[in-house]
Image (spheres, rainbow, N blue to C red):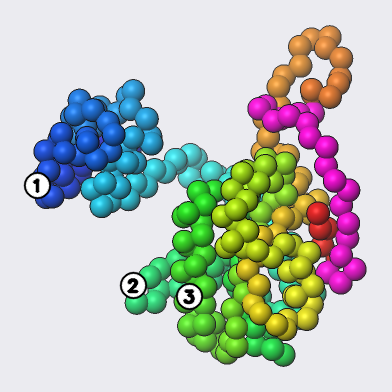
Amino acid sequence: MDRQRFGRSVRALRQRLGWRQEDLAARCGVSQTTVSRVERGVLAGTSLGAVERLVIALGGELDVRVRWRGEELDRLLDSVHAAIGERVVEVLSGLGWECAVEVTFDIRGERGSVDVMAWHPPTGRLLVVESKSVVPDLQQMLGSLDRKVRLAREIAARRGWPATGVARAVVMAGTPANRARVARFGATLRTVLPTDGRALCHWLAQPDGPDPAALWFITDRRVMTAIKRRRVRPKRRAGQAEGPSASVSVGQGVRPQPAARTSARTGARIR
């Protein structure tokens, strides 16, 4: 990050609005000294959350990126995402859906990409899938999904897929951490995504009735294996006996898992 340029950008936006540093500080719940330090590019000691609040208050959007060894970081991050997408496509293709992955769009200035878009030729139903390896910022995720669903008919029409309806699904890796975080936001998610993975799979086999909005946990072996490869395990001391702690990720406890069942129609493991 070019910290000096970042600081100048914050100052320029503040001055464009005609605000003093005190005005911006009051809107973000930080001190005037913090605003001054940020504008001078001195970010040490200032939380990322505080910096983001400053940018949002100015009408901007904070985009923080990590670069590492060219494209190797992308491959590292995409391994779980790719495994989830592959499993979703396998299930959908087996049920007669036509699938496309990473479908980019640029419609009236709205740009983005759909992780998986599927079309059911006999019924004309569309499915928009957002796949996540971890539970992200919920507001951003749901807002992005809503935008893609809104544009889905136009995106599909450009592929020659006439749509009679649009279903949506957020597909996540079924890890204990993901399930726990989803549980914390249960009321919100149940309102926006009331259908579970089991009900979604039944609908996919025979798409009739209302278009579902679903939250689907994937526990496919390839997905879970990709996650395990990313975990950091504590080093065992010399002479330390092999035990349960040797197979537990740092910062993650052991939680009992319910037995998985296999859907007779889709072959997907459902919890």
Secondary structure at badge 1 equals: loop
Distance (Cα) linking label 1 and label 2: 29 Å
Judging depth in this view, the residue of 26 and 236 nearest the camera is: 26
Q: Earlier in the sequence, mark 1 or mark 2?
A: 1
Q: Give yes or no for residue 18 being in the magenta stretch.
A: no
Whether residue 79 is visible, yes or no, is no
Residue 189 placement, left or right of 175: left
Question: Disc 2 designates what residue?
Answer: 109
Secondary structure at badge 2 equals: loop
Q: Looking at the picture, which amino acid does disc 3 mark?
A: Arg
Q: Quadrant of the N terminus?
A: top left
Question: Disc 1 designates what residue?
Answer: 18
Q: Position of residue 186 (x, y in %)?
A: 62, 51
Q: Earlier in the sequence, mark 3 or mark 1?
A: 1
Judging depth in this view, the residue of 21 and 102 nearest the camera is: 21
The magenta segment:
247-266
Distance (Cα) linking label 3 and label 1: 36 Å
